[in-house]
Image: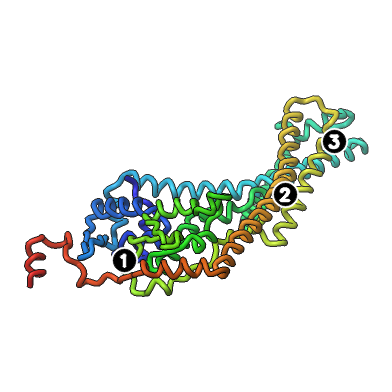
Amino acid sequence: MNPNPQLMKAVEELGYRVTCGDVVTHTGIYLEEVRAGLLTLASQTGGHLQVTNTGEVIYVLAPDFRRILLRKSIRLQFQGWFDRFWALGFYLVRISFGVLLIASITVVYLAILAITLAAIFSSEGGGDCGDCGDSCVLNIFSWGGSSSNTSSMTVVDPARSNKKHRKSLNFLEAVFSVLFGDGNPNADLEQRRWRYIGNLIHRQQGVAIAEQIAPYLDDLGQGYDKEYENYMLPVLTKFNGIPEVSPTGQLVYHFPDLQATLKAESGESTKVPKSLRERKWKFSKANPTQLRWSIVLFVANLVGIGILATMLGGISSSLVSGTMSVLALYGIGLIVIPTCRYVWVKYQASQVRLRNLRRSQEVKLLEQGDLIQEKLDYARQFAKQYQISDRDIIYTTEEDILPQEFKRLE
């Protein structure tokens, strides 16, 4: 079983001595997954288990458990190398779009300038072209062109390009951002959803009612599904909850595994937002100046390609035709992709606002009617929370069992 990175991070943040309940409320991972993951980590890294007089299991891991795990697992070592190479490769891909844009504009406008100068010299009867017509244009791009012109282009132009590349690194990243965005701002939505729910249950000392959980969920169902609180089933499954029925037939939900904790602070001090709010979608993280310049360069590139295609329209060459087709597709893509993405981002932003509004409306239901208060009053009888202390531990794998029995009898 591969260790869950989120679980390992939680162990480190909680001080390397944790219960399943503490990790669940910290991460929102399934309770059974946390239990299996902690047991695997303890067995693979030489950790220890401590058992309290109430049957609660505490997992104690070494501060260097990551290093121990890495040393034992070749697969994790390769994963670490792969992650580093992937980060470097993705960064190079990001900046390559800006480099290609600058290279495209440079090549296109230099070609336009060269053709224009060649036409001027040809009309004046100067230069080496004479009356060769369209062949003059082809000679400019041939490998056997004028040595002085070729050396001039190869010496001056790359230097400028490299200089611009070094100074415009942030702009190169902005080009990728304008084209493809910066990823889903709510990629961690499910993680946040379940962490909030786990922390809410912990703050409520292991009990909750459906109306308290609803502001963190999306699909509450309609009709009988919502009335009978079927949307609570995933919550019960994830946190090993138990439904309790009040004398008047109302449901409250009891989560015994989240009532024991090693944390020094009370569950009531845990801050939980009133509802789950999705982050707003943004077209790009590029600043306004970078955004404007990116759009200007996109348009300038397409216009230049159009002008160059017109100039080369009379040349029958498969190489020139193929090159211009690729440049045209590239230039059009630079305009079409951000435009389509802008419309899509606007739609996604409107959907986010609607979902956030719907969840915030669920919060208001907690303040309405005596029925909610009746359910809260009934839930309080199941609410309890106790902090585990060293006096509660009756067994640990750090020592042999006989010395522990003697200590306990003393």
- Rounded to the nearest whole Å, what is the CA distance between mark 1 and mark 2? 49 Å
Where residue 171 sits: x, y (%)? 65, 56
In the rendered structure, which disc, 1 or 3, sits on the residue that comes first in sequence? 1
- Name the mark on residue 260: 1
Q: Check the image and report above or below for 123 versus 33.
A: above
Quarter location, residue 306? top right
For discs 1 and 2, the disc positioned in front in the rendered view: 1
For discs 1 and 3, the disc positioned in front in the rendered view: 1
Mark 2 in CB contact with mark 3 (< 8 angstroms)? no
Quarter location, residue 9? bottom left
Instruction: Residue type at mark 1: give it.
Output: Ala
Where residue 53 sits: x, y (%)? 20, 65
Instruction: Residue type at mark 2: give it.
Output: Val
Which secondary structure, mark 3? helix
- Name the mark on residue 108: none
Question: Which residue in the protein does label 3 denote?
Answer: 311
In the rendered structure, which disc, 1 or 2, sits on the residue that comes first in sequence? 1
In the rendered structure, which disc, 2 or 3, sits on the residue that comes first in sequence? 3
Residue found 30% across the figure and 46% down from its top: 73
Q: Residues within 10 Å of mark 2 (few under 14, many from 20)?
A: few
In screen coordinates, is 311 left or right of 363? right
Residue found 78% across the figure and 31% down from its top: 139
Where residue 217 sits: x, y (%)? 53, 56
Residue found 73% across the figure and 28% down from its top: 319
Question: Which residue in the protein does label 2 denote?
Answer: 343
In screen coordinates, is 63 left or right of 188? left
